[in-house]
Amino acid sequence: MAESTHFKNLSNTDKLIDFVSQLGTPYNPTNPQLTVAGLTSLKTQLTTDYNNWTAKFTTYKADTNTREITFKPIDKLCTAILDNVKTLNVAQQTINDVSALVTKIHGNSSKTKKPSSSRLSPPTNPNDPAPSDTPTPTPTTISTSQQSYDSLIANFDKLVQQAQGISSYTPNETNIQVANLQTLFTTLNTVNLNAITATNAVNLARNQRNMSFYGSGTGLCDIAKKVKIYVRQVYGTSSPEYHQIAAIKFTRIKTK
């Protein structure tokens, strides 16, 4: 899993810092990023960004789950509304109009599948590239799922208004009464907005985490590589010091 790879990289940062600290005065790089102080500061940033992403991802999962659960009964509910209208003495065109909206809602509902989290394992060889990490939709695009939720809400609103406009639409079943449908419409809007907010937040947190861990030049993986090169420079390729630090692995995850 990519998630476990991030955590392993974070954990190995402690090993890296501890090792170079024990090297003492011979470890004296001119690049401030490679110093013990620089690495310690990086570890603080990594921890903050990783924990922030984890918290935002937890909220994202909760809010998108709530949205999925809240929207699930809509299909059957709309069918019930249409069936009730069909029992009334209304023009066929009215029935056709209601039927057309219900068909659209069914179509939107079939596309409202929550984007799944990628469950990726780190490569067998830590030097090999890892697959792309995409636990959430990218922030630069609007997913088909989100568009379908938005369209579903819009069409449901039209359906409720259409039912309200039929004077004989006064069902005894409380779940399809206009007042309760209006309340449900408000709830759908609320849970959808919560899911959108959570998605935006987790995308931003993921981007920051990726920058800290895998950013070019300033990310953990590149800095750790430079630390190893510096130890090789000071102690030599065949030295036990270099072999020890080379064994501390950092796996790079490709990010979008």
Image (cartoon, rainbow, N blue to C red):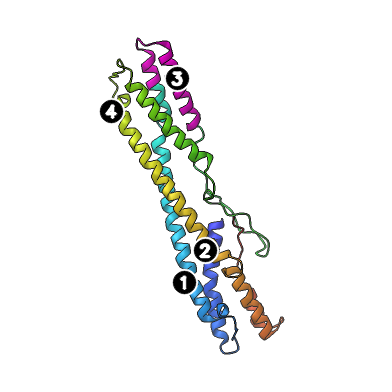
In the image, which is nearer the foreground, mark 2 or mark 1? 1
Q: Are marks 4 and 2 in contact (CB under 8 Å)?
A: no
**Residue in the foreground of this view, choosing between 15 and 154:** 154
Q: Earlier in the sequence, mark 4 or mark 1?
A: 1
For the question of whether residue 69 can be seen, the reply is yes
Q: Earlier in the sequence, mark 4 or mark 3?
A: 3
Q: Are marks 4 and 3 in contact (CB under 8 Å)?
A: no
In the rendered image, residue 131, in percent from the top left (x then y), is placed at 63, 55
Query: Can you tell which mark lies on residue 179?
Result: 4
Name the element at disc 2: helix
Q: Earlier in the sequence, mark 3 or mark 2?
A: 2
Q: Is residue 160 magenta?
A: no
Q: Earlier in the sequence, mark 2 or mark 1?
A: 2
- Residue type beneath disc 1: Thr
In the image, which is nearer the foreground, mark 4 or mark 2? 4
Q: Residue at x 39, y 25 (%)?
A: 159
Task: Quadrant for the N terminus, please.
Answer: bottom right
Q: Are marks 2 and 1 in contact (CB under 8 Å)?
A: no
Q: Residue at x 43, y 55 (%)?
A: 56
The residue pinned by badge 1 equals 44
Does residue 90 appear left or right of residue 254 in this picture?
left
Does residue 129 appear left or right of residue 190 in this picture?
right
Query: Can you tell which mark lies on residue 7?
Result: 2
Q: Residue at x 60, y 84 (%)?
A: 30
